[in-house]
Structures are given as structure tokens and as C-alpha cells.
Image (tube, helix red, strand yellow):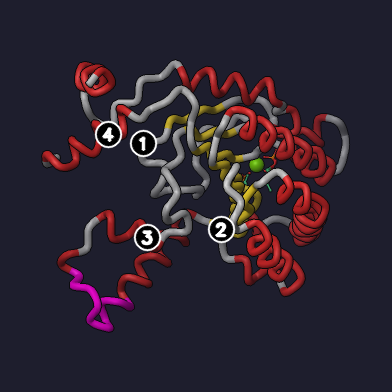
Amino acid sequence: MDNTRITDLAVVVANQSDIPRHVAVIMDGNGRWAKNRNLPRVAGHRKGVEHVRDMVTVCGEKGIKYLTLFAFSSENWRRPPQEVRLLMDLFLNALENEIIKLHKNKVRFRTIGDIERFGKKITDLIHQSETLTQKNDALTLTVAVNYGGRWDIARACAELAQRAVRGEIDPKTIREENIEPFLSLAGYPEPDLFIRTGGEQRISNFLLWQLAYTEMYFTPVLWPDFDRAHFEQALVSYAGRQRRFGLTGEQIEAARHA
Ligand code: IPE
Ligand code: IPE
Ligand code: MG
């Protein structure tokens, strides 16, 4: 690592706070929650929407500025068509019902992912919601729908390749920082804390690039049971960690007190 990067990291470390700026969540376990109660899977998805509201509220209270939620992966199309349709309807209804309240609470709403595949009704509503809330600055709520981390990176590479073909960029000069502006979350701070509910310990093609140095928190609690107390527990776990970004613990302490 060269000296410039160490200086950058010193700044990053000095700015570390016990409260994450950006939290990314895989909301998993809805189906199992419903199954445990002999209910159809969609009942779990429905219940899960309520906890999105709780999370947005807690983020507002704690001063967390970015919340990024995985709602539907590019691989979730493989599910039975009926479940996919119900998930779409639920997303549409939730957005229709909540967007005015989100706007009142100064939440900027965004989606990432290949939304065109959802058809005109959902795409239009997403665009209207994004435009309505684009100037809000209390919290950026980003919902990943038809999103895949590999799709995101491939798209950024395609964009760079096109620029190279047009002669706007020399491929030999491409560095990590040239890729970032073409990713879906360009301009966001990287997630500080990643939470996955439902007991699985995997990333399932979520934010592959951005999670490089994120603190991971896995909990067996199923998403429809994940209330504000569980979220606060995750925040306590985060606050107790020392992030080192490849440096030694001593370097981190020195940077903190510089
Ligand atoms: C997460 O819950 C929601 C989506 C993937 C849309 P699941 O539906 O994956 O629930 P489990 O993992 O089957 O319990
Ligand atoms: C990840 O959950 C995607 C979302 C929560 C939207 P999955 O339930 O699809 O992940 P896998 O299949 O268990 O890896
Ligand atoms: Mg699952």
C-alpha cells in the first residue's frame, strides 16, 4: 500500500463513529417464519414489510444516513411464479402506501437493480417516488430489487469498456477508483454494517464490491421477528468492534488519537 492510501485510511479511521453511516440488510427468513405457523409464505413477506418501517424509524433516531435493503435478488426469479407475483404486488402496495410518509420524514427513496423487468406500472411508480424524494436528506433508503452484485460489477465494466472504445479512457490506467463511479451505489459511503437475518451466513450476491471491509452481523432471528430491539443489538455489536482496514491495531489507535 502506498502512502497516499495510508493517509486516506487515517482520515477514515479518525472519522469512525460508534454509529454506522450506512447499514445494508439481507432481510431473510420470511418463508420459514410463515411455515413455522402453517401460513402461506406470503404471510411472512407481509409481516416483514412492517419491520422495514421500524428500521427506517430507528435509522432516523440514531442518525444513520443510509439504509440499503435487499428485497428481491436477480436469482429470486427462479421461485414459483405465483410467489414472484405476490412479492411484486407487495412491493407495489408498500411503496404506494408509504411514499408520502417517507417524503414527509425527509427520506430519499431509491432503488438499485434491473427494474425494467417488472413492467411499466412498477417502473413508473419507482421513478415517480425517486423524483419526489430526490432532494431529501434525512436518510437515503435504497431498496435492491432484481439486484445482483455480479450484475452491478458487469454493468460498470461494460460502461468502462464503452468509454475505452470511444477513446475516452486508456484501459491501462483503469484502477479501483475508476470502477466505483459506475456502480449502482456510486457516491454512497460503503456499508459500515451488514446484517443478515434468518440464520444463513452468506452474501447471496448482494453488494459484492461494496462489502469488502464491512462489518458482518449474522443473526438466526427470522426477518418477520426482527424488531427494533434486535436492530439495536446489532448496533451494539458494531460499536464494540475495531475496524482495521488491513492496518495493525496500534496504527488504528494512533490514528484515532492523532
Ligand atoms: C426473504 O425471505 C425474502 C425474499 C427473498 C424475497 P425468504 O422468502 O427467502 O424466506 P426463507 O429464506 O425461505 O425463510
Ligand atoms: C437473499 O435471500 C435475497 C433477499 C433477501 C432478497 P435468499 O433467500 O434468496 O438467499 P439464498 O437463496 O438463501 O442464498
Ligand atoms: Mg431465504
Q: Considering only vertical position in the picture, is 221 above or below 4?
A: above
Q: Which residues are magenta?
A: 162-171
**Closer to us: mark 1 or mark 4?**
4
Q: Give the residue pinned by disc 2.
A: 112
Q: Is residue 207 left or right of residue 80?
A: left
**Residue lying farthest to the left in this orientation:** 2
C-alpha span from label 3 to label 1: 18 Å
Counting residues from the start of the chain, the first of labels 3 and 2 encountered is: 2
Residue plotted at (42% across, 44% down): 189
The residue that mark 4 highlights is 11
Q: How many angstroms separate mark 2 from mark 1 (CA)?
A: 21 Å
Quarter of the image for residue 192 reads top left
Mark 3 or mark 2, which is nearer to you? 3
Crowding at mark 3 (Cα within 10 Å: few <14, some 14-19, many 20+)? few
Q: Position of residue 207 (x, y in %)?
A: 47, 48
Q: Residue at x 39, y 49 (%)?
A: 209
Q: Residues within 10 Å of mark 2 (few under 14, many from 20)?
A: some
Query: Which residue type does callout 3 highlight?
Result: Pro
Give the residue displayed 64% in from the left and 39% down from the top: 27
The quadrant the C terminus occupies is top left
The answer to whether 47 is drawn above or below residue 227 in the figure is below
Residue 33 in magenta?
no
* Dots 3, 4 in contact, CB < 8 A: no
What residue is shown with label 1? 213
- Residue 157 placement: quadrant: bottom left
**Label 3 to label 4: alpha-carbon separation:** 21 Å
Work out which quarter of the rendered image holds the N terminus and state it. top left
Q: Which numbered tag is attached to residue 181?
A: 3
